[in-house]
Image: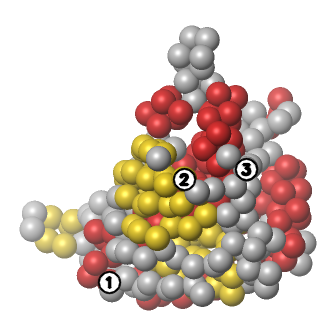
Amino acid sequence: MIVTRIVPPGVLATLLAVAVGCAPPPPTSSSGAGKPSSEAAPSTDAFVSKARTFAADFLKAVKAGKGEPAQLSAAFKKVYAPAELEVEKAQGYSDTAAGQLLKLAATEVGDDVSIASTDGRVALFVAKGKTGERTLVRVVDDGGLKIDWLGISPKNLTVELVKGDGTAAQFAAMTFVDAVLTRKFHLAEAVLTESARAKLGASVLDGKYNFGALKTKLEELIGGAATYTAPAATKDTVTATIGGKTVTLKLTAGRSPAEMKVDQVEVK
């Protein structure tokens, strides 16, 4: 069962604003000393409504094999479908590869969309698939709505959000663990802070960061596990059980309070 947590508007700014590649909200402008801007702040309810429709329509299109790379943010495409050809390297991503990956996701994505949380510019959604897979979707308003994250849990994983107050931390932790368990290590890498990458992916040869070393370390972490449970969460810590191991993820804000990233991974 999905546990939906809609955060009251007064608490939103202190909880969230997530996104790989999402810049923090622009500062409030003023027309003079002590005078507020004449531009009214956008309605959080209006944003949530538009973001929910956008996320639902996107997932419906993906399920129909018609997902469009143009709906993805450029920052996410750099993670999801990095440039492969020389002509693509300037932009940093491959729309062709992104389109192919979206077609492959057609049988995996959920379509029962529920909002997890929002800060008025970034919205986190959880969607449940017919066979139980959980889909995590992040929508960002970056001069227009874009899908800034698409993650799919391992098959037949119980679809639920962990308990606790840290919705942003939960979302980031689950994107990380889901990516590790589904062997999408490039997505897991994107959820780590630079310091966490350096520590987990240190080469045995020279101690420098190496993606191959990170992949090996994360494979050791999961130890053949296919599912996990995450029974406890706070605003910056999530504890999960993966393959009989207790894994504690320490999280920190990225470019904004809601862009949580995994900063430490402790295994016992």
Query: Which is nearer the eye, 155 or 126?
Result: 155
Left or right of 20? Residue 28 is left
Secondary structure under the numbered disc 2 in the rendered image: strand
> As drawn, is 92 to the left or to the right of 64?
left
- What residue type is disc 3 on? Gly
Q: Is residue 22 left or right of residue 56?
A: left
Q: Position of residue 154 (x, y in %)?
A: 73, 65
Within-10-Å neighbours for mark 2: few <14, some 14–19, many 20+: some
Depth check, mark 1 against mark 2: the one in front is 2
Q: Residue at x 68, y 33 (%)?
A: 216
- Counting residues from the start of the chain, the first of labels 3 and 1 encountered is 1
Please identify the quarter of the rendering in which residue 168 is found: bottom left
Q: Is residue 11 visible?
A: yes
Mark 1 falls on what kind of element?
helix
Tell me if mark 3 has few (under 14), some (14-19) or many (20+) residues whose alpha carbon lies within 10 angstroms of its own.
few
- Disc 2 target residue: 245
Q: Residue at label 3?
A: 224
Which residue, given by chain and number where applicable, does mark 1 sit on?
A: 9
Is the C-beta separation of discs 1 and 2 under 8 Å? no
